[in-house]
Image (cartoon, helix red, strand yellow):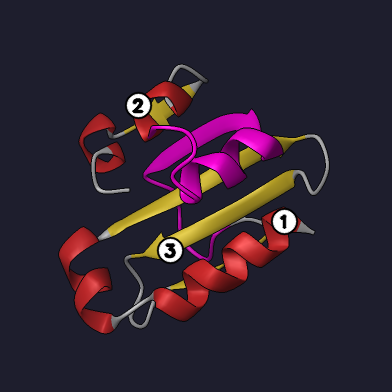
Amino acid sequence: GPVAETFRVIQGAMTEEYVRSIQGVFQFELSGDGGGTWYIDLKTKGGSAGFGKPPVTADVVMSMSSADFVKMFTDKLKPFMAFMSTVIGDMSLEEML
């Protein structure tokens, strides 16, 4: 589905340099089609993204609909608007997305 495809694209776009520059782990609690717990790990060497809990504790946890998540990562929804959803964690890391 669209959520899984978005995470495949994110995983494919990761670079070691990007991981070193961000140093954050993002967990997404998505509702709707393709929902569930997903993560982007930009802290662990090499980085990773996928379904389930992150391999290390998340710095930021975001709750949103799966449709809004896909829109956010395809530039159809400004990340700022997505942050109107529940956000827990280090607020400064959100600006890195």
Callout 2 crowding tier (Cα within 10 Å): few <14, some 14–19, many ≥20: few
Instruction: Pinpoint residue 52: horizontal percent, then vertical percent.
Output: 68, 58
Q: Is residue 42 left or right of residue 1?
A: left
Considering depth in this image, is 34 or 67 the residue closer to the camera?
67
Residue at x 50%, y 74% (from the top left corner)? 11
Real-space Cα distance between discs 1 and 2?
A: 21 Å
- Mark 3 and mark 1 lie on one chain; the one further toward the N terminus is 1
What amino acid type is highlighted by mark number 3? Asp
Q: Nearer the viewer, mark 3 or mark 1?
A: 1
**Residue found at the far top of this picture:** 84
Residue labelled with disc 2: 80
Is 73 part of what is drawn in magenta?
A: yes
Instruction: Pinpoint residue 14: horizontal percent, then vertical percent.
Output: 38, 76
What amino acid type is highlighted by mark number 2? Phe
Instruction: Pinpoint residue 58: horizontal percent, then vertical percent.
Output: 44, 48
- Mark 1 and mark 2 lie on one chain; the one further toward the N terminus is 1
What amino acid type is highlighted by mark number 1? Pro
- Mark 2 and mark 3 lie on one chain; the one further toward the N terminus is 3
Occupied quadrant, residue 94: top left
Q: Is residue 3 left or right of residue 13?
A: right
Residue labelled with disc 3: 41
Real-space Cα distance between discs 3 and 1?
A: 20 Å
Q: Is residue 20 left or right of residue 12?
A: left
Give the magenta part as a residue range.
54-78
Q: Secondary structure at mark 2?
A: helix
Considering depth in this image, is 87 or 15 the residue closer to the camera?
15
Residue 2 is tagged as 1
**Residue found at the far front of this picture:** 76
Q: Is residue 61 above or below residue 51?
A: above
